[in-house]
Amino acid sequence: MKSRELNRIAIREGWKLLYQDSTSHRVYVKNGKTIVIPYHGAKEVPVGTANKILKQIKGAE
């Protein structure tokens, strides 16, 4: 999964961009929880990392 896709999913799930660290990481916040999503454009995010991020995105209900 590409980092661009993870960012789209986070926004669709209601996460708000808090800030972007340099150019490689974006920090999102929702309900007092924060997640960091690496942002490298079209590069693939490793499977384990992507799964962990998706679990965090879905678990902030």
Image: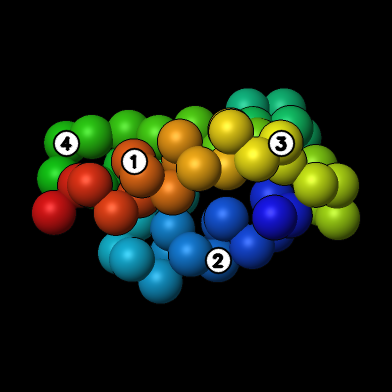
Residue that appears at 48% across and 64% down: 9
Tell me which numbered mark, 2 or 1, is placed earlier along the sequence.
Answer: 2
Tell me which numbered mark, 1 or 3, is placed earlier along the sequence.
Answer: 3
Residue that appears at 86% across and 55% down: 42
Based on the displayed image, in which of its 4 quarters is residue 46 positioned? top right
Label 1 environment density (alpha carbons within 10 Å; few <14, some 14–19, many ≥20):
some
Q: Is residue 7 left or right of residue 60?
A: right
Residue underneath mark 1: 56
Assign the C terminus to one quadrant of the image.
bottom left
Give the Cα separation between the discs numbered 3 and 2.
17 Å
Q: Amino acid at mark 3?
A: Pro
Q: Nearer the viewer, mark 1 or mark 4?
A: 1
SS category of the residue bearing label 2: helix
Label 2 environment density (alpha carbons within 10 Å; few <14, some 14–19, many ≥20):
few
Label 3 environment density (alpha carbons within 10 Å; few <14, some 14–19, many ≥20):
few
Residue underneath mark 4: 32
Q: Nearer the viewer, mark 2 or mark 1?
A: 1
Tell me which numbered mark, 3 or 4, is placed earlier along the sequence.
Answer: 4
Q: Is residue 58 left or right of residue 19?
A: left
